[in-house]
Amino acid sequence: MKHILAPLFATFALLLASCTTEYDDSELRNEIESLRQQIKDVETLLNASQNNLTITSVEESEEGFIVTFSDGSTILVKHGTNGKDGADGKDGEKGADGEKGADGADGADGKDGVDGKDGKDGETLIESIIIGETGVTFILTSGKTVIIPLEGYYDSAEAPIHFLDNTTKVLCVMEWDTDGDQELSYKEAAAVEDIGLLFQGSKIVAFRELQYFTGLASIPAKAFYNCTELKAISLPESAQNIGEEAFAYCERLEEVALPEGISTIEKNAFKYCEKLEKIILPTVLKELPYQLFYGCYALTDVTLPAGLEIIGERAFENCTSLKEIIIPTSVAKIEDYAFYKCYLLDTINLPEGIQSIPTGCFYNCEALPQLTLPESVTYIGDYALRNCYALGEVHLGSKVATIDDYAFYNCTALEEILLPESVTSIGAWSFSNCSALASVVCEPTSPPLLHIHAFDKNASQRLIYVPAESLDAYKQADVWSGYAESIVALEE
């Protein structure tokens, strides 16, 4: 589109620069307005092509052809305007009289000048249209050709599929054109049961027409692996499975339409789809596999299915733009490093039924301000909330038994923590480097097993509150004794 419109913007600049207040410039302004409308018409045309619209009517008027698309939008393809004829040439001069004596013959009349040539046709962005039996071809002044099918085109199984991307068409025709007409019909596409690795590493840009491959039950492993130019794809309603690394390293993929029937997606399926911003997952999907969206740096909008049960290991790791995610109440398990390095994540809910906050689950979620654990949680794993620098408020629930090593390490905004009576073990360095932590309330009457450096480098005036009847026990217990000067009775 940039290549088509760039010359027009240069034209605008020259036209506007020539405007002065010394003459009537209404004609010039009308030209500019006409060019603006033509740009709008080209945008409408390209939108129709990208969205598989059809043409419902083409009507000729005095100005040109009015084309109406299936979504109701219209464009005007103007006739070119002939320039004025050039002026006639001047008559030639007569010859001079001869000298005295015998009269010289008069000179012959000069020939008339040649008529001026016709002016060039007026320029339009859409140079011409060709109306065929099944579609209309638009030829742009840039040389680009756009073909839009006529209404009813898609009704016949024998009709050829209108591909948005010629590279995709070439590959499909090469592999599945059974009648040799150099086209792929809807019937031929529907007969395909396995696309194999035909497209792996190819330079296809769009493949919305995959939706017509209704014989496919699965998108094979690595089917579109490393298709670095692919921007948009639509899967057929028949698809039930997406294989391992099917779309991995499709670094420009922006749009993927998943049918509701997909029940399994295998690991790394969308790994490093760096431009993917939004995805709606099928309602029958039960599990997000290992590294499903690993390195999807632009991902901001994820709709999880209501029946989802498991968020797999590293599923959203390195989704550095993800700010909010709503976890369905059906989820019972979140696995290790699920949201590791989601630097901007600031809103998340944890449903009742989850029993652990696993290793590295929210490691480096630097923007997360608060977290409330459901009552079902009994375990907080290693590095679970390490480097959550904005974390100022944590509610652990009443059943947490184990807080593992480095669980809250470097949570520099955390000022207080309540360790419920259920806690039996506190890991090494678990609350170390929590430089604002001034108040630790321990409810267990028996000192939990405490590992080294658990409360090192807290706020300088940090106090550890314990039940009064257990004060001596805490001060004398292993590792706790190193913090004896900070341990006071809870009543105080």
Image (cartoon, rainbow, N blue to C red):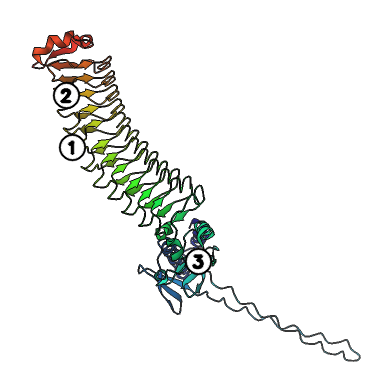
Is the residue 25 above or below the residue 89 in the image? Answer: above
Image quadrant holding the C terminus, namely top left
- Label 1 crowd bin: few (<14), some (14–19), many (20+), radius 10 Å: some
> Which of the two discs, 3 and 2, labels the residue nearer the N terminus?
3
Disc assigned to residue 90: none
Q: CA distance from mark 3 to mark 1?
A: 60 Å
Residue 359 in view, yes or no: yes
Disc assigned to residue 352: 1
Instruction: Say which residue label 3 marks.
Output: 125
- Label 2 crowd bin: few (<14), some (14–19), many (20+), radius 10 Å: some
Instruction: Say which residue label 2 marks.
Output: 418
> Which image quarter: residue 395?
top left
Residue lying at 34% horizontally and 48% vertically, measured from the top left: 278
Is the residue 390 above or below the residue 309 in the image? Answer: above
Task: Please state which amino acid type lies under the numbered disc 3.
Answer: Leu
- Apparent side of residue 118 relative to residue 411 in the rendered image (left or right): right
